[in-house]
Image (cartoon, rainbow, N blue to C red):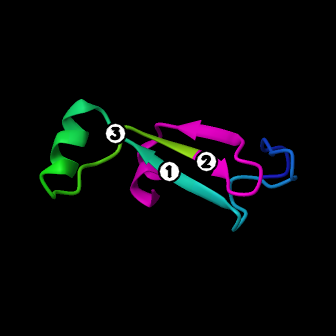
Amino acid sequence: MGDEPKCRCGYDKHHPMVSAEPKYDAKGWFWLIMGATPDPVRVVFKCRRCDQVIDESDDPEELKRA
């Protein structure tokens, strides 16, 4: 965990100021609009302070937590 990517503020993806933003494909967006909760295809970890993307993942375990 010590050599993970960090933003300009020095935060890694496990810091409370970093948000995990789920990303959906077209089918996922359709189901969101219809009121369902689809599974994301990717998650992007983004600092809320400097707005820098720290990391992206399509790992199923990471997607479950997003």
Question: Would you call the spot at circle 1 few (<14 residues within 10 Å), some (14-19), or many (20 or more)?
Answer: some
- Secondary structure beneath dot 1 equals strand
CA separation in Å, label 2 and label 3: 14 Å
Q: CB atoms at circles 1 and 2 under 8 Å apart?
A: yes
Q: Position of residue 32 (x, y in %)?
A: 22, 50
Which quadrant would the C terminus be assigned to in this image? bottom left
Of residues 9 and 13, the one nearer the viewer is: 9
Of residues 10 and 30, the one nearer the viewer is: 30
Residue at image mark 2: 45
Q: CB atoms at circles 1 and 3 under 8 Å apart?
A: no
Q: Residue at the location (73% across, 63% down)? A: 15
Q: Residue at the location (70% across, 47% down)? A: 51
- Secondary structure beneath dot 2 equals strand
Check residue 7 for magenta coloring: no
- Secondary structure beneath dot 3 equals loop
**Which kind of residue does numbered mark 3 sit on?**
Tyr
Q: Residue at the location (80% across, 55% down)? A: 11
Q: Which residues are magenta?
A: 45-66
Q: Position of residue 7 (x, y in %)?
A: 80, 45
Residue at image mark 3: 24
**Which kind of residue does numbered mark 2 sit on?**
Phe
Residue at image mark 1: 21
Judge whether 33 appears above or below 35 on screen. above
Of residues 35 and 62, the one nearer the viewer is: 35
